[in-house]
């Protein structure tokens, strides 16, 4: 953890580099200083079928859900969320400006007792190995 999941309307991929967006959001997550680098994941999934708003087919969406482990204050998570959301806004500014992109971010905490992990990447990064 933390894992950032992006779900977006498929036509958005013709207008924005989704891979570059994922990387910009990964860097924003690191920049918060709140999350361990080895746990950061950003994944994006296109919604090929969707319906939204008034049916205007020019409308797009990007819905982000950040799932984090327990133990961080709400203030810290709010600040990190604001930084991550701002990174998405900056990256997508031209599309937001045309009034056809809906952008959202929700933060959810994973219950530690119900979260199972096996991640040796933490040890590798801590040891300074590539």
Image (tube, helix red, strand yellow):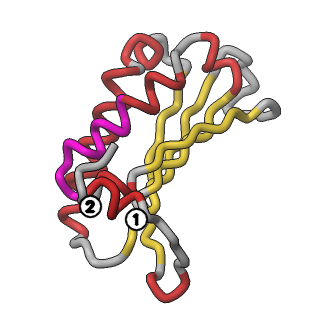
State the image quarter where residue 83 is shown.
Answer: top left
Q: Check disc 2 and report the residue beneath it.
A: 77
Query: Which residue ends up furthest to the right in the rendered image?
Result: 49
State the image quarter where residue 59 is shown.
Answer: top right
Q: Residue at x 25, y 45 (%)?
A: 30
What segment carries the magenta color? Answer: 24-34
Q: Which label was assigned to residue 58? A: none
Residue 96 at what x, y percent from top left?
A: 44, 19
Q: Is residue 54 above or below residue 69?
A: above
Q: Check disc 1 and report the residue beneath it.
A: 68
Q: Residue at x 26, y 61 (%)?
A: 77
The Cα atoms of the two marked residues, 1 and 2, are separated by: 9 Å
Kind of element beneath mark 2: helix
Residue 92 at what x, y percent from top left?
A: 41, 20
Q: Residue at x 69, y 33 (%)?
A: 46
Assess disc 2: are there few (<14), some (14-19) or many (≥20) residues with their C-alpha within 10 Å of its C-alpha. some
Q: Residue at x 75, y 25 (%)?
A: 55
Q: Quick check: marks 1 and 2 in contact, CB under 8 Å?
A: yes
Query: Which residue ends up furthest to the bottom in the rendered image?
Result: 113
Q: Is residue 6 above or below residue 125?
A: above
Assess disc 1: are there few (<14), some (14-19) or many (≥20) residues with their C-alpha within 10 Å of its C-alpha. many
Q: Is residue 14 left or right of residue 17?
A: right
State the image quarter where residue 123 is shown.
Answer: bottom left
Placement of the C terminus among the 4 image quadrants:
top left
**Magenta region includes residue 26:** yes
Q: Is residue 5 left or right of residue 35?
A: right
Placement of the N terminus among the 4 image quadrants:
bottom left
Q: Is residue 54 above or below residue 107?
A: above
Residue 33 at what x, y percent from top left?
A: 17, 52
Kind of element beneath mark 1: strand
Secondary structure mostly seen in magenta is: helix
Mark 1 or mark 2, which is nearer to you? 1
């Amino acid at each position: 953890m933390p894992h950032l999941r992006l779900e977006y309307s498929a036509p958005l991929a013709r207008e924005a580099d989704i891979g570059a967006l994922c990387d910009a959001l990964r860097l924003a997550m690191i920049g918060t200083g709140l999350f361990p680098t080895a746990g950061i994941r950003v994944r994006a999934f296109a919604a090929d079928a969707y319906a939204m708003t008034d049916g205007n087919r020019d409308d797009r969406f990007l819905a982000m859900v950040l799932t984090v482990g327990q133990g961080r204050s709400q203030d810290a998570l709010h600040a990190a969320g604001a930084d991550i959301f701002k990174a998405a806004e900056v990256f997508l500014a031209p599309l937001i400006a045309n009034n056809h992109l809906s952008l959202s971010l929700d933060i959810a905490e994973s219950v530690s007792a119900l979260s199972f992990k096996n991640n040796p990447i933490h040890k590798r990064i801590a040891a300074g190995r590539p």
